[in-house]
Each structure stands twice: as C-alpha cells, then as structure tokens.
Image: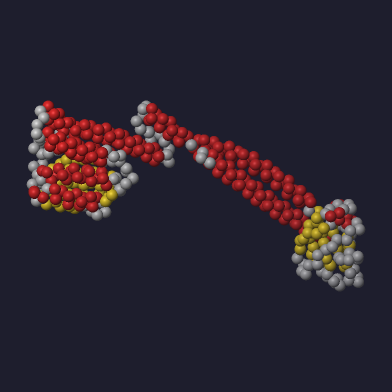
Amino acid sequence: MKSLRGRLLLASVAGIALASLLAAWLLGAAFQRAALGSFDRRLADDLVTVAGVIARDGDGSVRLRREPADGRYARVFSGHYWQVGDGPQAFRSRSLWDHLPVLPPMPATGAVEYGELSGPRGQRLRSAQRRVQLPGASAPVRVWVASDQAILDTEVAQFRWLAGVTFAVLAAGLSLAAAAQVHFGLQPLRGITQRLQRVRSGENERLAVEPLPTEVQPLAEHLNQLLDHHERMVQRARQSGQDLAHALKTPLAVLDAEAQRPGAALADTVSEQVARMRAVVDRQLATSAPVDARQSCEVAPVVARLRDYLAAAHRDKALALSMSVPAALKFQGAADDLEEMLGNVLDNACKWARERVQVQGGQAGGRIWIEVGDDGPGLAPSLRAAALERGVRLDQRMPGTGLGLAIVQDIAASYGGALALDVAPLGGLSVRLELPAA
C-alpha cells in the first residue's frame, strides 16, 4: 500500500478491531466466571436447605423431617433436582420423577464438590454435593442438588451478544475518530505540498518553517537546504560560463591580431594560444561539475599532495612550505573541489611569497577552516574586495586570468562555505577557507 493515509487507517482499524474483539471476549469470559460463581453459590444454598430437612431415626438410619418447601422441586423435570442418599432407598425430589441420576462418587470429606452430569431429557446439569455425617447415624449420607445449566448458558450468551454489539459500535466510533485523526494529522504534509507548488511557481523563494508542526519542520528545513544547494549550483554554472568567456577573450584577441598580420611566428602563436584555451576549457570543465555534498575527503593528504607539487613547480624560489593540518580533519564534499580551491590559493601564495608559505587547519563546530599565509607583500584592505572580483588582476606582471580567487570563492559558496582575506602571521596575505565538516 503506497498511500500513507491508507496505511495509517488500516493499522488503526485493524488495531481497534483486534482490541475490541479481545475486550469483548475477555469481558464475556469474566461474566461467565462471575455467573458460574453465582450459580454455584445458589446451589450451595440449596444444598444447605436440603441438608436441613434430614434427621436420624431411632435405628440410626436417615429420614426426612419434611419435603423442602421450594416449589421448583415439585414440578416434574423442572430443571431443579435434589437427592439424599444412594440407591433405591434414596430420597429424591418429585421433579426427578422416575429418573435415576448417575452420580459421581460420594465426597471423601464434608467439603462441597461441584460437577456436571446429564439429567432427565438430556439436560446438562450443574450439581453440588457433600458428605453429611449426622450424630448417632450409622453411616454418612450424600446430599446432592442440581440445576439445569441452560439458564446459565442463556444468560452468558445474551451478555456476550450484548458485549459484542457494544464493542462493535465502539469500534466503529473509534474507527471514525481514527479517520478524522489521520485526516487532521496529515494536513501539514498537504501544506508542504502547497508551499512547494508556490515555490515552484515563484510566489515564494523558500518554505516557511515556523507555521509547521515540530515533527515536520526538519523535513521543511532539509527541503530548503536542497533548494539552497540547487540555487548555488545554478549560480556556479552561470559563473563558470562567464569565467570561460572571460578566460578565452584574451587568447581569441591574440589570434585575431595575429590573423591581421600573418608572419613567420603565426603557427607558434596559434599553437600557444590553442594550448592556453584548451587548458582553460579543461579547467572550467573540472570546476563546473555539480557539487556532490554526499562525498567527503580528508584534508591533510590533499594539502600534502599540493605542497609537494607546488614545491617542485616553484623550485627556483626555494620556498619553505610548512603544513599543520590535523589528520582527522575531513571536508564534506568532493576531493577534486577541495584540490581546486587549495590549488588556486597555494599557487597564488607561492607566486607572491618571498621565502615561506604556511598552511594551517582546524575545526570549529560543524565547519572546518583552512588558512594559507605567506611572507609576501600582502594586500591592502582597500584592495581585498577587488581581488575577489572576476577577471581583476591587481599586478599585471604576474601571469594569470584574474579568476583564481573568484573561482575559489564560488566553489566554497556552492558548499555553503566562505573565503576571507586578512594579514598573515608571516606578514603577507592570509586566505582563510571555511567549509562544511564531514
């Protein structure tokens, strides 16, 4: 069953039905036990009544002083019977007429014993008997009374039917209440559907979390996070397209100029600019891949790999690249994106550093931070905002497209992170990345 409403209703109705059946059965069993107890007490009272009319004869035998006055025992096969003694000489109620009941063995003690046996016309009798020893009597005597159990069975059946009808009505009412409860309880989910439709149509930018119940708010918050992630991906794709156009503008201008005045160096120039454009395209394809926030990677191996590569690339400067990154530090994102961000930042630091580049990392709450500092000339506070703009090159003497830090900022923002520029402890520029921790 795919319907959540159907599942809840099925579970509720099935639970109510089973509970009602069990309750009706238990109540019927309790009533039957109570009715049987009352029936046995009435038999015990009748037993005392019959035992009260017996007496001892002079020869030690037992006789009846009088017949019990209860009219139930006077009607033939009335369903109420008594007997005193055993065998043909026993005293019997008129209601037994000529029927000789087959009685169980006489009790060994004076305690009352209960049982069931067949009576006249196939009646099912509930009986009570006890052993009575009269003073001076030659032998103990059995006193036995019985009543038709059909009376008890009729009362129990009527009660069970009444209990069944009552619990059926109760179950129907509870099922209706459960249906209303499910309808009312699932309204917030319908509210989320309507809110999503308004987001899709552009009426709202995000789902309003506050009006929703506490249990549904985390779902709405996660949906908002997905919407934020999607928006960052769209923005990242748009920026990647702009970066690609900006990066290709210069090589295309060079090729156009060379085409206007062809010479012997034309082939070399074309090859150089084509290689430059191919590198730009490959780089943009790598950085424009969608963010997969389900991935995670360790930071220290990425930093170590980049440190070794850049140390070799800038071996002419003999830079000292130090790294202080905890081994347990993990980034919630793709290793390629982390390598792209740190590669740009470290390469920029190596270009401007005089002798030293320092990489540090740590974690604060659910975010990690990675800080790259150098001992270069640094950057004035008034120029830091411009350094993060796309295509801005503050020093034309250094090669590049002016997109490095802007790309880093875009990738960090696509993960909900941030990039900040400051003064490094070594005296140069400090670039601090804050990213989600795994």
Residue 323 in the image: state x and y as whole percent. Answer: 17, 52
Q: Is residue 427 visible?
A: no
Q: Answer with left or right where residue 41 lies relative to residue 321.
A: right
Above or below for 121 versus 57 = above
Query: Colour scheme used in the picture?
Result: secondary structure
Q: Is residue 57 left or right of residue 6?
A: right
Q: Residue 273: horizontal and vertical position, in percent?
A: 16, 36
What residue appears at the point 86 percent right and 65 percent down from the top-left corner? 85
**Residue, x 11% and y 44% (percent of image)?**
351
Q: Return the residue nearer the eye: 322 or 347.
A: 347
Residue, x 68% and y 42% (percent of image)? 165
In-image side of 52 versus 13 (left or right): right
> Does residue 216 appear anywhere in the picture?
yes
Q: Tag count in the figure?
A: 0
Residue 31 lies, in percent from the top left, at 69, 51
Q: Is residue 61 above or below residue 389?
A: below
Counting from the top left corner in percent of width and height, residue 16 is at 59, 44
- The structure residue drawn at horizontal position 65% and vertical position 51%, both measured from the top left corner, is 26
Query: Considering depth in this image, is 356 or 270 the residue closer to the camera?
Result: 270
Query: From this viewpoint, which residue is outermost toward the front?
Result: 264
- Using the rendered view, name the quadrant where residue 267 is placed: top left
* Pick the front one: 65 or 195: 195
- In the image, 295 versus 312, the foreground residue is 312
